[in-house]
Amino acid sequence: MMQKDKGLKRIKSSFKYAFNGLIDTYRTEQSVWIYIPVALLVILMGFLLKISNYEWMVVVLILGIILSLELVNTALEAVVDLITNEYKPLAKKAKDTVSAAVLVFAVASVIVGLIIFLPKFISLF
């Protein structure tokens, strides 16, 4: 029984740390401030335009992946800043590359969003 209690305590701690990271990123990263209202708008539009279950799966995956990429971007930037305070070309390359990954997926997400939502929006008129 003692071993089970330790396991549950570790799982609880893991969730606590994960939520702390999410809350901290929300408080400190401007891109996440933009992401949240956009995500809420996408969800609202999904309900209003009655997207299919398949389309919901795609939307939820995209929303999850883009938020995850933002979190990875934030973590990598923090690690680079921890390692060096001075300008270093490789540090800049690491930060720029992970930011580019977020941008590429964001553009792809917008295209997928247009494929899902635009026909439904046009059919309203």
Image: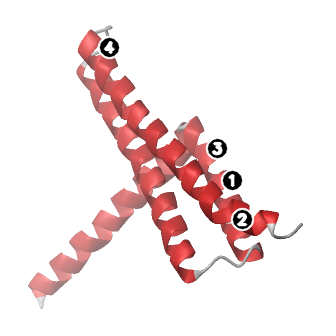
Residue 70 sits in quarter: top left
Placement of the N terminus among the 4 image quadrants: bottom left
First of labels 3, 4 by sequence position: 3
Under circle 2, the secondary element is: helix
Is 40 in front, or is 85? 40
The reply to whether dot 1 and dot 2 touch (C-beta < 8 Å) is no
Is 110 in front, or is 8? 110
First of labels 3, 2 by sequence position: 3
Q: Residue at x 45, y 65 (%)?
A: 61
Q: Amino acid at mark 4?
A: Asn
Comparing labels 3 and 4, the label whose residue is closer to the camera: 3
Residue topped by disc 4 = 85
Q: Residue at x 34, y 28 (%)?
A: 97
Classed neighbour count for the residue bearing mark 4: other residues with Cα under 10 Å, few (<14), some (14–19), many (≥20): few
What's the distance in space between the residues labelled 4 and 2, CA to CA?
A: 49 Å
Indicate left or right for 93 with 124 as reference: left
